[in-house]
Each structure stands twice: as C-alpha cells, then as structure tokens.
Amino acid sequence: MVKPDAPIEVRDVPEPELGEGDVLLDTIYSEVCGTDLHLQHGRLAGVPYPIIPGHVTVGRVRRIAGTVAPVEGPPLREGEIVTFLDVHRTCHSCWYCLVAKASTRCPSRKVYGITYGLADGLTGGWSERMHLKAGTKIIRLPASVPPERMIGGGCGLPTALHAIDRASLRLGDRIAIQGVGPVGLNLVILARLSGAGRVIAIGAPRNRLDAAVAFGADDVIALEATSPEERIARVQELTGGRGADVTIEATGVPGAVREGMRMTRDAGRLVVVGQYTNAGEAAFNPHADLNRKHLEIRGCWGSDYSHFHRAVEILARHGDRVPWERMISRRYGLEEMNEALADVQAGRAIKAVVDSNAAPS
Amino acid sequence: MVKPDAPIEVRDVPEPELGEGDVLLDTIYSEVCGTDLHLQHGRLAGVPYPIIPGHVTVGRVRRIAGTVAPVEGPPLREGEIVTFLDVHRTCHSCWYCLVAKASTRCPSRKVYGITYGLADGLTGGWSERMHLKAGTKIIRLPASVPPERMIGGGCGLPTALHAIDRASLRLGDRIAIQGVGPVGLNLVILARLSGAGRVIAIGAPRNRLDAAVAFGADDVIALEATSPEERIARVQELTGGRGADVTIEATGVPGAVREGMRMTRDAGRLVVVGQYTNAGEAAFNPHADLNRKHLEIRGCWGSDYSHFHRAVEILARHGDRVPWERMISRRYGLEEMNEALADVQAGRAIKAVVDSNAAPS
Amino acid sequence: MVKPDAPIEVRDVPEPELGEGDVLLDTIYSEVCGTDLHLQHGRLAGVPYPIIPGHVTVGRVRRIAGTVAPVEGPPLREGEIVTFLDVHRTCHSCWYCLVAKASTRCPSRKVYGITYGLADGLTGGWSERMHLKAGTKIIRLPASVPPERMIGGGCGLPTALHAIDRASLRLGDRIAIQGVGPVGLNLVILARLSGAGRVIAIGAPRNRLDAAVAFGADDVIALEATSPEERIARVQELTGGRGADVTIEATGVPGAVREGMRMTRDAGRLVVVGQYTNAGEAAFNPHADLNRKHLEIRGCWGSDYSHFHRAVEILARHGDRVPWERMISRRYGLEEMNEALADVQAGRAIKAVVDSNAAPS
Amino acid sequence: MVKPDAPIEVRDVPEPELGEGDVLLDTIYSEVCGTDLHLQHGRLAGVPYPIIPGHVTVGRVRRIAGTVAPVEGPPLREGEIVTFLDVHRTCHSCWYCLVAKASTRCPSRKVYGITYGLADGLTGGWSERMHLKAGTKIIRLPASVPPERMIGGGCGLPTALHAIDRASLRLGDRIAIQGVGPVGLNLVILARLSGAGRVIAIGAPRNRLDAAVAFGADDVIALEATSPEERIARVQELTGGRGADVTIEATGVPGAVREGMRMTRDAGRLVVVGQYTNAGEAAFNPHADLNRKHLEIRGCWGSDYSHFHRAVEILARHGDRVPWERMISRRYGLEEMNEALADVQAGRAIKAVVDSNAAPS
C-alpha cells in the first residue's frame, strides 16, 4: 500500500537480517479487515506509508534468532505454526501502562501492518514472509485450531472479547449488537457463549444478517429497511418494552452511538467499540439519552495481550461448535488485493483472507 | 406555585387529617433549589400544578398517627427535629426495583414538592406545616447537626454523594467539577473529603467560585472568561497534561457533557448528574471524545435513601470543619418566594432558604 | 415435620381464610432439598416446629383474594400455574435493605417451609394446598417451562445463580466446583452457560458425578478416591499448573473451604455458598492460603427475587438443551416423605420431588 | 546480614561498575521494617544470604550510566534526590503479568534488600551507596517532600495504599484497622484521607496507639487489655451494633484474621494484608464467620509501581497536615543496626530509620 487511495502494488523485498530474539515467519494467512479500508483511504493518522498491511496473521516459523519463548509453553521451534499479538512495544514503563493500567493507551505502541511501515521491514501480513521483532508476543497455535479458524476469528475476535469483558454481561442479559461486520459477528458468538438471554443483531447487508443468525443471533434487524426509531422500537419490543440490558456498538457510524443509547434500557450499559476512525460528529440529548436513563457508556479501545491469549483459548474450546472459518468469504492471492479491498468495501465479502501462497484465481 | 411562569401565591390550607402512620411537621427550613426554577418554568413533565414546592425540608414533629419508626433508632416522638427522604413510594416490587436494582428508575416514585401537588395535601416544604404520608423515610436529625447545616447541605448533598459514589474516585485522583451550584459545591466538599489529589471547579459567577475555594477547591476556572478549548487546556495543564482522572458534570447545560469528555484523561471517568431537564441536544465526536479515549461515562439519576442517610452522617461527622450552612445566602419568608426564585435565577444567591416562620424582611 | 429427628406426619389442616392479596394454590410439586435434611436434624436456629417443609414449589392458582399482580405481566387468574419466591417479608425499610443493599441479610425475612411454621397456616409445599400471603413475589410459569423442569431446577438454581454472579466469571475462566448436590449441579450448568473455559466438578457419589458430566462438566474428581492434596494437585494439573481461576464451594463441609482456597490460582476468586449450617470450625493458613495468594473469598448468602426471576428466564431459554428435569430421581407422595428424606440423606436420590397428588408408589 | 539469627556486620564493598542504564546513589535514608525482622529470623524463603537489607530508600544520584528517565519528568541528573520502587524485574511477559494482570504475583520479581543479595552488589539501603540496575523504577522526590517524610511513610505507605484500594472504601464507611505498626498507622492516615466515617485502630503497645490517635484514629482498642470477644464487642458498640463496614488486618498474627471476620458487619469487607510470613494456621467457622455473613475477604499481596507513585503524590499533597516524619522514632548509623533491630522487635521504636551518614550516637 504505497499511499492512500492508490492501488496496491506487489513488490520484492530482500529477506531481513534477524536481530537477537527476532523470528521470521512464512505467512500462511492474513486478513483484510475494516482497518485496512481505513488505511487505504488515509483515515488513520500517523501511518508511515508505504506499508505492508495485514495485522492479525498466522504463519509458520522459518527462522529464529536465538531462543524465543511464548508466554506459555517451551521455546519456539522452526516449523511450528504460530500467531502473534499485532500490537508491539507496549512499554510497561509509562504512566498509562503502570499507573492508569490502561495499556491500550500507551503512546509507545506500534502495530504490525498499521504503524510499522515498509521502512521497518517485513512488518505486515500481506506478504510471503514476516519479520517479528524481539519482544513480539507470539502464541503457538493449538493443534485443535487450524489456521483457517484462527484467521476466521481474526482481529475481530480479541476486539469483541475486550468489548464483551467491558460490557459486564450478566447471565441472562438481553443484548443488542449494532453492526454485523467481523467484530459484530464475533460479538454475536461471544454473547451466546456468555449465556445472553437474547441476542439481537442489527446491520446490513442481508448476507451478514444471515451469518449473524447462523452464529446464534435470536433476532436480526435489517438496517436498510428501518429508521432509527423503528429499530429502537423493535429492540424494546423484543425486550419486554424496556430496551436491551446491554448494547454494544460496532458500526463505525457516528449516529449509531445515540441510537445505541436509546435502545438500551434505563440503568443499562452501552459499550462503544466501533468508532475506530474519525467519521465526524453526532448529536444526542444529554438529559433523555444519558442522565435520566442512568445509563453507563464505556468506550473500548484496542485490545491487549490478554484478549488475544484468551481468544485463542476460546477458538480451541468452542471451535467444534462454532465454525469461525465460515466467516471467510474467499481467499485472495497477493496479486488480488485490490479486488479483495473492493469486495470488503462493497460488503460482498464478510471476510477476505490473504493467502500469499495461493495461485491467482 | 399555581402554574408555570406565574407568581407564587401564599394560600391557607386546612390542617390535614392523618392516616395511620402519617406524621405532621412544623416546617423549620426548606430550600429553593435548581429544580424549583425548572418547576417555575414548566420544564418538568408530569407536575400536578398547583403544587407546594420544597422537597428537602427540616421540621419538628407536631403530630404522629400511631407509631412511626425511622430506619434507625426508636419510634418518633412529638417535638423531635427530623428530615426525610423527599422520594416516597419507591415500590420495591417492580422489575426496576427488584431485578435491575435501579430503584431511582422505579416508575411508582413520588417526590414531595415535585410530583405531589396541592391536591395531595401539604406535600411541599414551602409551607408552615407538612404532611408526611405513611412509609415516608424519616431521619431524626442528630444533635450535632443543626437545622441550618442540614438545609445548607440540602438536596445537593445526597445528589452529590450519589455522583461521587458513581465516580469510583480513587485516593489521589484529580477531579474536575463542572458547575458550582449547590450540587457542584457539595461535590467540591465530598471530593476533598474523599482524598482527591486535586479539585478543579469550573463555573460562574464569581461569588460561587469564591465559595468553591472556601469549600476546598484547589483551582477554579471562570466560565465567563474562557472558551471551552481554554477550559480544557487549563484542566490538562493542571493535571500533568493528561486531563482529569474523573470529571463530574453538574451544570444543566447540554454542551458541558462534551466539554467534560474532553477534559477527562484517556481511560478516565465522566459522571453526568446535571442534565436534570431537557435543555436540548449536544454534539460530540464518538471517535475522539469517547472510543479512542477508552472513556467511561456514567449517567447518575436521582438519589435513594442510602444517599440521604449517609449524607446526614457526613454532616454529623464533618460539620465542625465544613461550614455547609455558609451555602445559605439568605432566608426568605413565605411572602418572599418570588424574590427568592429571582435571586436564585440570577445567581445572586448560592442557596435561598425558606423560613416559613420568618418575619418578612 | 413435628420436631427435629422425629418422623414426618401427614395431617389434615383446615382450608385457610384468605386476607386481601392472598392466594391459595393447589400444589403441583415441591422438593426435598439439603435444607430439609438440616430441618429434620434441628440444625437451623429459629425454626417454629411443627412446620410444613417445602420452600421452592410449583402450584396452580385455586383462589385469589382481590387482585394480585406478579412483578411482570397482568394480574393472576385462577388456574394459572405459578411459582413464587420462598423468601417473604424482606422489609425494604431497614438499614441492611436500604443502606447496605444486602437484602439477604434483612432481619425481617420469613421463608416458606423454613421459618414459617404450621402455626402460620399452610406455609410449606409438602401439602396439597399452599397459602401465599399478600406480598409474596409470584411468577407465572412460562408455557415453555413445564412444572417438572421448574422443580428440577428447584431452589438450587437461584442459589447457584447468585453464586455465579458473585464469582464474576470471565469468558474462558477455568472453574472448579466443589460439591455435586443440586446446587453444585446447577453450578455446572450455569458455568457452562456462562462460557467457562473448563468446568471441574468435585464430589460424590458416582451417580452425581455422572450427572455432573451429563450436565456439562469437563472433568470430575471423585471425593472418595482422593485426598485433599490429590484433589488440589489434580485441579492444578487440569489448569496449566496454576489452579482454578474461580472456585465455588457448595459442599457444607467446613474443611472444603480451605481446600477451595488451595485449588484456586493466585489472584483468583473463591465463592463460598455451601456452608448453610454450622458444621463446626476449619483451619487454614492465612499466609499461604489467602494473603500471599492475593486471593478473594466471597461468602454468598441466600438469594433474592432477582435470582429467582432470572432463574425462571434461564429455564425458559435453555430448557430445550439442558434437561433440568433429569435431576429428579423420583417422585414421592406425602405419605412417603420419610423415605424421601432417607433417600436424599443417603445420596441415593439427586433430587426427591414431592408430588402431593401422587398415588403411593 | 550474614545469615539468619546472626549479628549484622558492617563490611566494605568495592564501588560497583555501572552497566548502561544503571544509577549509583548516595543513600540518605533507609528504614527497618517488619520485613527486616523476618529476614533476621530467617522466616522468608529464597533469601540469598548474605544480604544488605533495606528496601524503601531515599538517596542522591551520584552517577548515571547513560540516560535514565523516570516514569514522569525529564531524565535524571546527578545530585537529584530520588526514591525507587524496591520491586525490580516485574517481567510484563508472563501469564500473571499479562493475562491475570496480577503483577504482584509475577515469579520474576526481585526485591532490593530482600531477594537481591550481596552477591548482586550494593542492592540494599543499609549502606552508604546503592546500585540501581537498569530498569529500576525511579521517582524524583518532589521539593515538597523532604527525605524524612518519604522515609516516614516508608514501605508501609504503598502497602497501605494497595490495601485501601482493595477495601473499596465508600465515603462514610466505618473502618476497623487491626495493627498499629507502620502499615496500620498508614492505614489510619489513608482511611482518614478517604473520608471514613469512623476509624477504629486496634493494637499495642501504648505508644503506637497514641500515634494512631495523633494520626487520626477516632477510637483505639488496646490489645493487651482485651480478649478477642471484648474487641469484637467494642467494635460493634462503636458501629451501631453491626460491626465495621470494612476491616483491614495488618498484624501478622494468624488468629487476627478470624477476629477480623467477626468484627466486620454482614455483607462487609475484610482485607488481609498483614500475613506476610507463614506464622502458622488459624481456625474459623465457615458458616458463621463467612457464609452466613455474606462476607467478602480480600487478600492483598505486595504493591506495584502504581501504589508507590501515588504514595509519593499523597506525601506531597498532604504532608503539611499529616506529619509522616513523626513515625520515625530514632535514626541509627550503620554500626547501630543490631540495636535498631532490637528496638523494632521490642516495639520500642515505631520506625527505626537508617542514616548511613550519621555519626554513632
């Protein structure tokens, strides 16, 4: 990705020299997520174009410089299949890390495929090899989690897990999920796994709503056919007239936040996880939508190693009943990435997976 | 108060008949609070005009029908000085009371001086006598709390206590308080009592800012002399460049909510307690003001018996060091209530107290 | 139950006169739970023998005095099938109810079948009719919850739900459950519904461990074949060497509490719900078992209406996949209650259900 | 400290070579705390005798190898007065650090003066110089915090702050503090700063109880003159018959934990912070002391950088009203450390401070 709003180019890059503690992977799969659309359109600040996109990635260990140990288990060996936390260099030394204990706000964080660029080397998953720098948090993929399943969960799964944690869901709570992209669909899955009393998914287009039902939504509300007032009324109707106990916003559309406030019951909770880029302002009524409702709103930024670690455990535990790999609409070779981005943009794909070893289709 | 935007009238009302469990008080003090301005201007829904305003009130027990016990201590006796929770008839039988445990959203609640009207009898404190219906939660005023101090704390104190509880203030946290009315000033007091690391009060006019300093604010920011951007910058400057750990909004101005979001640090908390009536909409940026900040926003509606009970205990414990009675700007007789409302409206009075026994000044 | 350690007698009682708001039920099912064994052996203080045991009960409305509304839905009608919260007269007026918000410690509580006695009328479920006094919290049984399923969940389900709430289980947490009686088995069910990462059930005898597996336990540890050290070692082995993230004690055996501390990981949580009667003292090591572990221990007493309400919702939602009715080992007529108690005592029955309409077997 | 139960020896040690990021201090003050008595008697496992004791320490920067930045503020300069977190090498890479977020249970932690020994160099504060290894978390002492005040707070202050955080104290809560050593006295201070409704300190000997009163305790209960039952009864008497809302144990005596359970009200909280070493077992009654009480018990182990950082802020904010330096009973030169230990052991000193520059007294 040379610069915003320009076509993706496939380039040859020399194999990197590894420093002590570095690991070189042969990539197996990476993904196209909503962030990559933001990157393509230049909506994120501080991106060092040109970059190799692709943050959550699965690969096979090709070379290890020295001894590298994952958080759990013995040191890595060549040939093992691994994934890794895309966020690197959380400093554990600043006020946000140590005093506020809000490490997702650490200013030193670097993200593979987003804030590392080509100048930093093979730092994105849309490539045949990937260079993991010393200190990267690597997880050995359990045998029960095939690479397809891991990339099917993708970066949406740890993000959704962070949001579910922050929702303080109580067994039996009725939950409304705004958005049925990869984060929204993972929220449907996790809400069901958490024992939600009713899961209502709201979004578009139809193929994603169908996926929401397949992944366990009790009810879906089609965005296209309804006004905000109708959606709010429908959620109330499905929740005994009160509104959802918990709502999680995962849309990226500013106006969805107020709609989320209004479809949540009094004294309920709204988690906002979808406003990843600046898409403008939104209005709300501080009296009716917030104060009188005794509402609690929790912004949720990024995810940390704990979410990634637990996400892999959840894939291992529930993979036999939850077909995460079905989120994958199609696999794309490196030459097809412009098409992949266009398919995701148009909503034709739920998830486009990058398979750098694929023969062009 | 005959109807919205009409002058207050002084009327004679026959002495009520007491049912079993009722109590008749000789009122000592009641107060004029911001809610009474809202009532005067018809900004609250469901008010059964004509009403006798006056919710938080201190009185002397004149008559008791049967045996009436407060939550703590022996049954009431005639002549004792008492106060009572203005909220009556919380049902403890509905879904909100029993399942959500959000009793301030109980639909059965009635509030003396607000949702009880003249048709319900002597149900407001702006009168010589007051009729407390059976089941009203009455507190015997401790000997160490003179009536002046109780009414100095007024309804602002339990409201502020609820908001402070909801702020989850940690010892040493830096707090910004938006608004220096009775709720805001009580927040300054409670923040100091809670061990806040720095207390920044923001508001107007000057006499209230002076009171904020007298009650313990470390810094004040004058609303009139500053733009929102300047206030946000000033809070950041006073908090090591990060913003307040906790902000509490107590203004009633819709735009203050966004300003509060922006003056709070990343991963901090904003409590919204001041948006008591519908004063219109406000804009915010869901990405920059909420999601990326990992901010938590907590609406805070009303207060329940626990806040009132603990407020009286706090007055008893700290009254020798915190002169709550100095919030009282002037005492007004019943004939002076139009003037009292005008003084509060204009900000000339911090708190106007109703003394139905006062000779006209 | 005439007095402790005496045989149950079947007696004729005159049909009660109903006061305003009272309801008379034809009982359908009641149950024999561990509490009834305690009652039989006189282990509970303040029990007004003779009593009619039977707290959680399902019945059909026979007569209604006036209009009686459940928490949700329209007023009751004759012929409807209902259940009710066995705890009555929580006062919502005392310091524990209002200030501490710990209503299960309200001193005014009365419990049908336990602290109401025969002198109070038909106040237990081991009878053909039952007299629900005004203010009893009644729930209309949803059509999707047959009476068998409701009594299969029994009083163990709301108790387990309270304990699960108090465990603050996080999606994927590994949980150890000590005890496989009705509370322990319901904990297995609820832990699975909550998305536990691994559910380890510990207890005896074998038929209950088999039930634990049928209800979703991943692993069981037989009490009889193991020492405490072996059980602790086994839990560690099943949890990556660290111990359970969360342990819930539901045994009634004092020594189980320390064992629970030791099988929980550092910085984990232990909920103690099984120590319902005074069975003596236990030893522990405050340094090694509590302080150095940074352990959190949460006692959990009784349950309130919210747990009962949500328990019925959980039965309605998950009954098609979780066969609560399979907890029922056998139905007993009123003449067979001595046998029922003996079967529960001996562990032959997981749950003995009282069917006052049954022909003697 | 050559080995357990042997006299302290003063030895000459060669000045260390500094690696990149290391700092050499001229020590100003260190302290003798209860841990040092445990060290002297060999009660802690894994101590690499011989060691230089002295963990919380204040010093002046003598030399810096390279550039060393504290968590806040510009890089250190020679001559500045600093203190530092005695815990070093928390790894931020293990399951406890990253997934459980319980970094005080990180197995990689090393503590200056405790688990670093003489073989690791000048790693304790009972010396003229101290060698801080790269990565040590250093705090520049604010100008408003003289070294006397910092060492007066000592290691008891961050420990007490951690315990107060864990107590979830609510404004107005009544608190019982078991123990009046440095941790207990700091708890008295912090409970007052947090707005406790009543602070009851329990301990011995008399000089420490007097200090508790001077630091803000409302009531003291002398350990020597009372039985456990009398102390429990006295706490109940001082708390309206219910027991303390919150109790914090800071004694080191196993039996105090049960006493703490019993002096806490139903549905209250007990924090256990004083059981730092294994002093044997204790008995309790799981039914009466824990389950029926609906009690919450929270073990509290160690402290992390956040507690240390905030402790320094608290000293800066409240030092003009709270004379932490008065905890210092006497200053001892290095040659007097055997006497210092004996004075602390006998309770003659509240706090013995090590002043390596002092002329022998």
Image (cartoon, coloured by chain):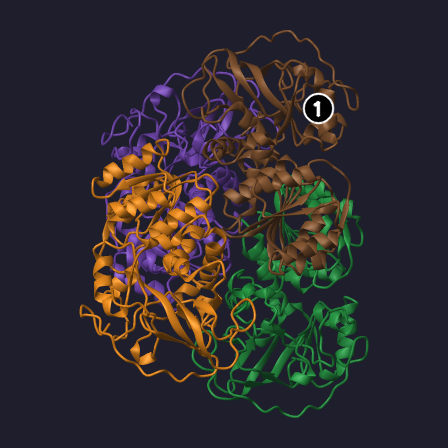
Chain colours: A brown, B green, C orange, D purple
Mark 1 — on which chain does it sit? A
Residue at 57%, 34% in the rendered image: A157
Residue C20 is situated, as x and y percent measured from the top left of the image, at 47, 83
Rendered view: A156 above or below C169: above
Judged from the image, the secondary structure of the residue bearing numbered disc 1 is helix
Task: Give, as a three-letter code, the residue at label 1.
Answer: Ala
The front one of D293 and B53 is D293
Judge from the rendering whether residue C344 lies leftward or rightward of residue B31; answer left or right. left
Residue at 55%, 14% in the rendered image: A25
Q: Could you classify mark 1 by the number of other residues whose Cα lies within 10 Å: few (under 14), some (14-19), or many (20 or more)?
A: many
Judge whether residue D105 can be spotted in this image.
yes
Rendered view: D197 above or below C202: below
Residue B249 is situated, as x and y percent measured from the top left of the image, at 68, 55
Rendered view: A112 above or below B152: above
The front one of A152 and D295 is A152
* Residue at which label 1 appears: A340
Rendered view: B274 above or below C251: below
Judge whether residue C286 can be spotted in this image.
no
